[in-house]
Amino acid sequence: GAVVSQHPSRVICKSGTSVKIECRSLDFQATTMFWYRQFPKQSLMLMATSNEGSKATYEQGVEKDKFLINHASLTLSTLTVTSAHPEDSSFYICSASGGGWQYFGPGTRLTVL
Amino acid sequence: GENVEQHPSTLSVQEGDSAVIKCTYSDSASNYFPWYKQELGKRPQLIIDIRSNVGEKKDQRIAVTLNKTAKHFSLHITETQPEDSAVYFCAASIGGNTPLVFGKGTRLSVIA
């Protein structure tokens, strides 16, 4: 299957700082990428849909000013968690859509101290 | 929007027995139903999927059935092995570049 990478795999930051997570589709062009968040022992919840060249669409309850998404190319989408707080600590997973299939990245575990 | 319910939340089976996980969905427009296996700390891995033009699909020990009229689909694992222990998620979407809506997951434990 297609390969999607995420960087970093783990990040620990202090409260109030910003963290950027990159999601790349390595061998196909993804016009759409999705960002999910998964709290411990819970399911994956969609945060936002990212379309190349346009503004992201956020799910209800997700603050667009806090979770900045940029999808500047067909192979890269970034999620920036601004002014992170301990409650933002979670597993963030992107998926890239291509050819009717979705491929997940390996995830980024964010811990905010 | 779409709502996916998944049952049971936990399931324990003896090695060699079968395991069945069931999901229901609400949006009749959904036509793509994947199943993911997630091991601790790792990304979900697609194990099998089915589209609405098919009622059943099988891949070795894993099978998925779909009843569009009743809006439910099920995962069947036969001859379970300890390495099948993981959390399994069902999902639904209307296909194309649309997001998946996930069930809450089933923690499967296969006891040797």
Image (spheres, grey):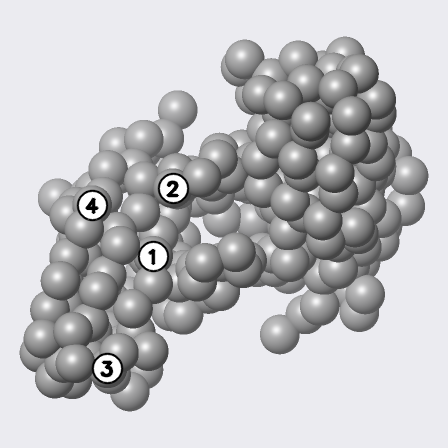
Q: Chain of mark 3?
A: B
**Depth check, front residue: A101 or A15:** A15
**Depth check, front residue: B73 or A5:** A5
User: Which quadrant holds the N terminus of chain B?
Assistant: top left
Q: Are marks 3 and 2 on the same chain?
A: no
- x, y percentage for residue A60? 53, 14
- x, y percentage for residue A55? 80, 24
Distance Cα–Cα, label 3 vs label 2: 22 Å
Q: Residue at x 58, y 42 (%)?
A: A91
Q: Chain of mark 4?
A: B
- x, y percentage for residue B41? 52, 56
User: Which amino acid lies under the numbered mark 3 shown in the image of this protein?
Assistant: Gln
Q: Residue at x 11, y 69 (%)?
A: B13
Q: Which residue is mark 1?
A: B87
Q: Is residue A18 visible?
A: yes
User: Which amino acid lies under the numbered mark 4 shown in the image of this protein?
Assistant: Ser
Q: Is residue B69 visible?
A: no
Distance Cα–Cα, label 1 vs label 3: 14 Å
Q: Would you place residue A87 above or below residue B39 in this image? A: above
Mark number displayed over residue A41 = 2
Q: Which residue is mark 4?
A: B9
